[in-house]
Image (tube, rainbow, N blue to C red):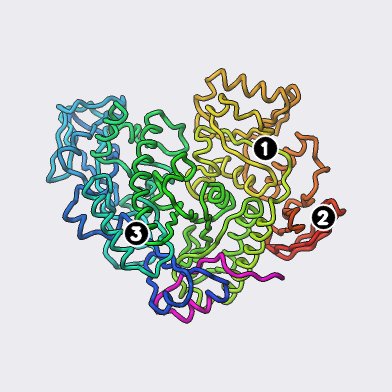
C-alpha cells in the first residue's frame, strides 16, 4: 500500500524478549507497548521511547488482605442441584456439581438468613422452620418432604477464584496462586483498594495509561465439577456476581423493598440477558451501576492526579460499567478497549461515548485461542485465523471508525511465525489508512435510518450477551453482524422509546427474536400503544423487516430465520433497497455478495474488500461510472475517484 503510516497500534511486550518486542514494535508500527496478564515489561522495554499501557485488575491479587477480611470476598447466589425426595425427609449437599475451586459456601448468619428452600415440583417455598443447615457437612436437611417431589436450595457462596484468572490458569497451565476477587462494597475494602491504587501509581512512574480490566464485577461464569461439562452457566450481561448481604441491605434502604435469593435464581433459570428484564432486575442493575460509577470515578480521578490516562476494558469485570448507560461519561475514562471477534463488537466499541476507542484483535497470542482453536499450538495457523477475524472486523470499521487497534498475550509465540507477523503488518497498515479516510469525512451512506427494536434498546446496542460463538443460536446476533458493515445508519430502541416517538425518523424497523424472549420483546407487545404506533408508522411508509405484505405506503417483511453469511447479508440489504424503491439504482455497492465496498467522498477513496478465501471479481456503480475490480482472497483494494 502507498502512504504508509505509523502509530495507532498497541503491542504486547514481554520481559526476556526485549529484542523481539522492539523488532515487532517497529514492524507493526506500534506507538504503545503494553503488559498482559502473566507478563511483565523490563526496564529496557519501559525506557525504549514508547508509551506504556499497564494492566490493572483492581479487585484481584490481594490474597493476603482478603484472607484477613474474608467477608469482603465476592459472592453469588447458587441453586443446589435438584434432588428428588424418596421419603419424608431429604439431605442436600450444597456444592454437589459445582467446581469447588471456584466456590465456597458463605456460612455466616447474615448469609444463611437469605437462603431459601423450594419444592420445585410445586414451586412453593419450604418454610424455614422445616429445614436446617448442618454447617460441618455443608448440608441442608429438609425435615418434611413430599415423596418424589424435587427440591433445591438457594444459597449464598463465596467466589474464591477470580474467573478470568481461573480461565487463564487452566488454559495456559499456570501453577501460580489462585487469585481471590475482592468486593469493594464495604468501606474497609474501598479504603484498602484506594490506598493500593495510590501506591501502585507511585511505583509505576513510566506508565502513561492505566488499563483497568475492568472495574469490579465479572460477568457470570459458573463452572461445574465435571470437566466434560465445565461451563454450567455464563451470561456476559448478568449481574449475579455483584450480590452480597451488604449490597442487598443497601438496595432495600434505597429502593424501599427487599430482594430475595429467588429474585436472582428464578426457578433455576437465573436472569440471562435473553429474557425480558423485570422491574426488579432493572432496579438492581441501576443500583449497581450507581455504585460502580461512584467508586470507579474516585479511582479514575486518582490515576489522573498522577498525570496518567485511564482506559477501561469492555469485557471481563465490566458489569456495572455499562458504556451505553447515561452515567458512563461520569467515570472520566480517557479510552475504551474492546476485545473483538466480529464486526458487531467493533461497532459496540465505536458507538460508545469515549475519547479513544481501541480494539483488541484476535487471535490473542495464546497457545489456544479464546474460541478454542489451537492457534499458536501444534496444528494451528495463526495467519489464517488473523485473516478470518480481520475479514469480519474490517467491514465494520469501514462504517464507523475507532482510534486504535492492538494485540494481547505472549509475544514470544510469534517468534517462529513469519506469515502471521507479515499479515499483522498488513492489517495495521490497512487500519491506519482507513482511519485516515474517516478523518477526512464520513463514508457514503444510503439515506435509510434502521432501528432495531427489543426489550433492552440502547443499553444493549449491537450486542446480545457475549461473543458470537456464545450467542449464535439467536437470529438477532446474525442480523447485528450483517448490519455492522452495511451502508445504513443503525440505532437500537426499546418499547418505551417507541411510545416516546422514536419511530419518527426511522425508515426500517427490525424486530428479531423468539416468542417471549428479550429480543422479540415479550409482553411489551401486549401494550396497545406500541401496536398502534407501529401500524401508523408502517402505514405512513415504514418497513418492519420471506413474505412481503403491503400496508399503506409501507411494507411488512417476514423472515422465518436469519443466519449471517455473505449471501444473506446481501439479501438483507436488497430487502431494504427493494422496500425503498432503490434496488439496482443505488451507488457505491458491489454487484456480488462476496464483496463489499465503502466510499469516502471527502477523501475521494473507494475501499473494496473480498470477504472470501477465493479470488473474486466485482463491479461498482459510482458517480464516475462503473468500476471493475479483481481481488485476491481477503484482499482490500483502495481506488482513487475523481
The image shows residue 536, relative to residue 481, as above or below, that is above
Rendering coords of residue 397 (x, y %): 62, 54
| Location of residue 491 in the rendering, given as x and y in whole percent from the top left corner | 60, 39
As drawn, is 53 to the left or to the right of 438? left
Q: Identify the mark nearer the N-term, 3 or 1.
A: 3
Number of callouts: 3
Q: Which mark is residue 516?
A: none
Would you name the residue on which mark 3 appears? 165
Kindly state the secondary structure of the residue where label 3 is placed.
Answer: helix
Q: Residue at x 72, y 53 (%)?
A: 598
Tell me the mark number nearer the camera, choosing from 3 and 1.
1
Tell me the crowding category of disc 1: few under 14, some 14 to 19, or many 20 or more residues within 10 angstroms, Cα based: some
Local crowd size for mark 3, using a 10 Å CA cut-off: few (<14), some (14–19), many (≥20) = many
**In the image, is residue 14 part of the stretch drawn in magenta?**
yes
Q: Which residue is mark 2?
A: 619
Q: Nearer the viewer, mark 2 or mark 1?
A: 1
Cα separation, mark 3 vs mark 1, equals: 42 Å
- Give the residue pinned by disc 1: 449
Magenta highlight range: 2-24
Quadrant of the frame with the N terminus: bottom right
Residue at the extreme right: 625
Mark 2 lies on a secondary structure that is: strand
With 584 as the anchor, is 368 left or right in this view? left
Q: Position of residue 353 (x, y in %)?
A: 52, 47
Residue 449 placement: quadrant: top right
- The answer to which of marks 2 and 1 sits earlier in the sequence is 1
Q: Residues within 10 Å of mark 2 (few under 14, many from 20)?
A: some
Quadrant (top left/top right/bottom left/bottom right) for the C terminus:
bottom right
Location of residue 231 with respect to 379 vertically, above or below: above
The x and y percentages for residue 457 are 53, 35
Amino acid at each position: 500500500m502507498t502512504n504508509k503510516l505509523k502509530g495507532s497500534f498497541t503491542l504486547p511486550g514481554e520481559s526476556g524478549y526485549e529484542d523481539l518486542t522492539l523488532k515487532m514494535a517497529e514492524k507493526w508500527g506500534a506507538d504503545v507497548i503494553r503488559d498482559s496478564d502473566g507478563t511483565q515489561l523490563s526496564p529496557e522495554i519501559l525506557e525504549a521511547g514508547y508509551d506504556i499501557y499497564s494492566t490493572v485488575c483492581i479487585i484481584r491479587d490481594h490474597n493476603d488482605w482478603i484472607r484477613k477480611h474474608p467477608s469482603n470476598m465476592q459472592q453469588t447466589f447458587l441453586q443446589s442441584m435438584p434432588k428428588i425426595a424418596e421419603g419424608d425427609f431429604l439431605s442436600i449437599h450444597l456444592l454437589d456439581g459445582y467446581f469447588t475451586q471456584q466456590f465456597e459456601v458463605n456460612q455466616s448468619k447474615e448469609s444463611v438468613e437469605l437462603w431459601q428452600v423450594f419444592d420445585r415440583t410445586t414451586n412453593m417455598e419450604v418454610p424455614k422452620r422445616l429445614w436446617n443447615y448442618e454447617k460441618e457437612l455443608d448440608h441442608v436437611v429438609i425435615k418434611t418432604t413430599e415423596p418424589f417431589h424435587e427440591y433445591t436450595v438457594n444459597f449464598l457462596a463465596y467466589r474464591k477464584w477470580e474467573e478470568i484468572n481461573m480461565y487463564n490458569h487452566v488454559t495456559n497451565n499456570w501453577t501460580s496462586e489462585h487469585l481471590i476477587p475482592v468486593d469493594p462494597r464495604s468501606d474497609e475494602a474501598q479504603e484498602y483498594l484506594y490506598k493500593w491504587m495510590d501506591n501502585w501509581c507511585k511505583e509505576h512512574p513510566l506508565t502513561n495509561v492505566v488499563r483497568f480490566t475492568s472495574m469490579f464485577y465479572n460477568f457470570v461464569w459458573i463452572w461445574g465439577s465435571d470437566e466434560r461439562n465445565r461451563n454450567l452457566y455464563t451470561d456476559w450481561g448478568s449481574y449475579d456476581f455483584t450480590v452480597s448481604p451488604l449490597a442487598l441491605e443497601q438496595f432495600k434502604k434505597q429502593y424501599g423493598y427487599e430482594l430475595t435469593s429467588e429474585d436472582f435464581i428464578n426457578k433455576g433459570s437465573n436472569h440471562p440477558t435473553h429474557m425480558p428484564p423485570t422491574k426488579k432486575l432493572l432496579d438492581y442493575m441501576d443500583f449497581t451501576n450507581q455504585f460502580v460509577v461512584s467508586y470507579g470515578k474516585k479511582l479514575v480521578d486518582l490515576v489522573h492526579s498522577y498525570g496518567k490516562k485511564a482506559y477501561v476494558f469492555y469485557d471481563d469485570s465490566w458489569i456495572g460499567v455499562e458504556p451505553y448507560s447515561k452515567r458512563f461519561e461520569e467515570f472520566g475514562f480517557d479510552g475504551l478497549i474492546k476485545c473483538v471477534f466480529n464486526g458487531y463488537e467493533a461497532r459496540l466499541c465505536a458507538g460508545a461515548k469515549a475519547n479513544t476507542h481501541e480494539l483488541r484483535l484476535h487471535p490473542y497470542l495464546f497457545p489456544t485461542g479464546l474460541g478454542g482453536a489451537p492457534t499458536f499450538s501444534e496444528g494451528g495457523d495463526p495467519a489464517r485465523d488473523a485473516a478470518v477475524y480481520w475479514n469480519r472486523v474490517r467491514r465494520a470499521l469501514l462504517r464507523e471508525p475507532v482510534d486504535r487497534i492492538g494485540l494481547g498475550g505472549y509475544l514470544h509465540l510469534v517468534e517462529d511465525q513469519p506469515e502471521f507477523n507479515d499479515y499483522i503488518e498488513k492489517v495495521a497498515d490497512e487500519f491506519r489508512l482507513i482511519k485516515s479516510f474517516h478523518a477526512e469525512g464520513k463514508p457514503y451512506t444510503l439515506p435509510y435510518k434502521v432501528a432495531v427494536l427489543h426489550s433492552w434498546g440502547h443499553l444493549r446496542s449491537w450486542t446480545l450477551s457475549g461473543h458470537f460463538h456464545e450467542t449464535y443460536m439467536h437470529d438477532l446476533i446474525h442480523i447485528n453482524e450483517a448490519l455492522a458493515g452495511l451502508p445504513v445508519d443503525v440505532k437500537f430502541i426499546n418499547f418505551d422509546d417507541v411510545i416516546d416517538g422514536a419511530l419518527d425518523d426511522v425508515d426500517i424497523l427490525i424486530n428479531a427474536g423468539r416468542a417471549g424472549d428479550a429480543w422479540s420483546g415479550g409482553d411489551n407487545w401486549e401494550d396497545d400503544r406500541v401496536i398502534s404506533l407501529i401500524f401508523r408508522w408502517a402505514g405512513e411508509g415504514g418497513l418492519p423487516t420471506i413474505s412481503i405484505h403491503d400496508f399503506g405506503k409501507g411494507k411488512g417483511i417476514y423472515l422465518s430465520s436469519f443466519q449471517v453469511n455473505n449471501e444473506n447479508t446481501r439479501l438483507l440489504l436488497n430487502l431494504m433497497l427493494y422496500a425503498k424503491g432503490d434496488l439496482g439504482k443505488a451507488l457505491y455497492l458491489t454487484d456480488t455478495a462476496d464483496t463489499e465496498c465503502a466510499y469516502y467522498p471527502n477523501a475521494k477513496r473507494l475501499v473494496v474488500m473480498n470477504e472470501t478465501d477465493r479470488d473474486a471479481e466485482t463491479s461498482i456503480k459510482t458517480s464516475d461510472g462503473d468500476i471493475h475490480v479483481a481481488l485476491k482472497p481477503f484482499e482490500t483494494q483502495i481506488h482513487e475517484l475523481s
